[in-house]
Amino acid sequence: MTVLPTEGLSARIAARLKQAREDIGLTLAQASKGMGFENYQVLMNIEKGERAVKALELVDFARLYARQLDFFLSSAEPSPAPAVIWRSRGIDPVARRVEREFLGYCEEYGRLETFADGAPTTLKLKSGAVSGFDDAVLLGENITRQLELGSHPAKALASVLEENGVKLMVRESKFAGSAASTVGDFGAGVFLNSSNAPWRISYDLAHELFHLLTWGQFPAETPDESAGEKPMAEKLADAFASALLLPEATVIKEYRARTKGGDLGYVDCVNMARDFGVSTQALIWRLISLRLVTRESGTKAIESESLKELDRSARQQDRKRAVIEWPTPRFIATAFKCLQLGRLSRGRFAELMEIERGEIDGFLAQRGYNAWEDYSGEISTA
Amino acid sequence: MPGRTIRARLVLLDADVIIELFRQGIWDALVSKVQVFVTPTVVKEVRFYPDPASGQRRRVDLQSYVDDSRIHLLDAEAESLDATRDACGKCLAIHPGELYSLAALKAADNACKFCTADKAAIQALVLLDMTDRAVSMERMLGDAGVGRKQPLARQFDDEYLQKWLRSGAVLKAGSAAL
């Protein structure tokens, strides 16, 4: 049966299929291939409303375009997508698809939190106006204290941020870009690319935290890398990340313990950076900003081939260490609670955890949960 | 004819139920006695089951059963998918493929029952006014006269189904009050 795009459900589906495809930057040919259509004209006709879409095809479109069925079917106009700021954006269409998946993840995480606890968890921390580097550094130091991140904040940062309502999504992708942040009805979210080195991921996370804390103070725009100089917000985010991950008092203490009044050897420098979970380059810039080393000797060290070689060799094992477990323990716990409450289906759970349907029980057992046990008991508050 | 069972009962099976039937080694016995329906999404989704003896993955090929007409596909229309989403979407997070199964059930013959152990799917049946279409695996096997090789886990018994149907009724009352 041919359905023309006059009004009603068929016209709505046709228009939204086109929008969803364009949102993730797929051509008609690419999307047709993903759907297994013989040629692109089938999809073109669907989008024009000249060929009715089958319900089963709609299920497949939802997967291909990383959308919920609601998007295609709901009579309500879809809300504009929240802004996503990338630290360094990757190549389309991969980056666009990852961005869509990231927003979808944050939206679903927020919905599960609502089912489990009544409302999405939102980031309670806020920042005052940040107008310069001193403000950014001060904010970084304050956040380290407020979140009780300890002397080596990189180690605890991801789990503490999750506890404080930041939804973390991790993907391994060469082309997606390094990191991104967003704020919406679901709260705050950060995307991290696990193809990067662990110390880079920690720095990205701290950097993105600055954007979350100052959301609305700066234009919500991804910096144009071809423009040369970084926008001020990016420079401030770097200063904030440095102050957060490398607390002044601990850095000075460890620097003095290692130098004992003399110079800082390259081996000590690399090991110190490894202890803090940051790149050696980031540590040296922090030592420069704290005036513990001169700019001249610091930049010379950064450019030194022997330091680079030492760094590469010393960090080979570190590269294999995951900074953030994926799916994150808090996301799994939230989803499991919804499973227990009967608000999340097992099929959707498997999809969210990126596992096969037959793997659910084993996946949960590995994490100490019994998929079918009834954990409905409660302890009364005093 | 003595010893021959008439395959009059109609039942749509959820993925977990299919996996359990294979795990128990009673899948073929069931499909020989009951008219089994599945949705195309479930055919794609159920690809293996864990062997209880070895713990190894064993392959499942539901498509071959469809090809031989030993089981049958149930389809849904976009309109019924929309109605299903509309009724369940605010209260439950359900996979599009599972919504498709529920939409197909809604459009199917009233005699067709739905066998599932998924709490969310059971509650969805109540939200969709299909409480009477729910059947537990315990009841389904009993009605079909299929014996079990191992005891059924709690989630497949009738008491579990009834508990979550009651919970669905509470959820429905709550969502109506919103």
Image: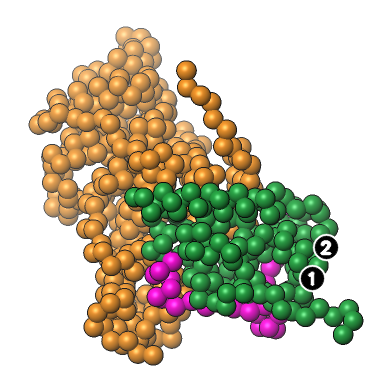
Q: Which chain is orange?
A: A
Q: Are marks 1 and 2 in contact (CB under 8 Å)?
A: yes
Q: Residue at x 23, y 64 (%)?
A: A77
Q: Could you tell me which secondary element the residue under label 1 belongs to?
A: helix
Amino acid type indicated by mark 1? Ala
Q: Which residues are magenta?
A: B56-84
The numbered disc on residue B147 is 2
Q: Which chain is green?
A: B
What is the distance, in whole Å, between disc 1 and disc 2 at their CAs? 9 Å
Residue A50 appears in which quarter of the rendering? Answer: bottom left
Q: Position of residue A243 (x, y in %)?
A: 26, 26
**Residue on which disc 1 sits:** B29
Amino acid type indicated by mark 2? Gly
Q: Residue at x 23, y 49 (%)?
A: A85
B42 within the magenta span: no
Q: Which chain is home to disc 1?
A: B
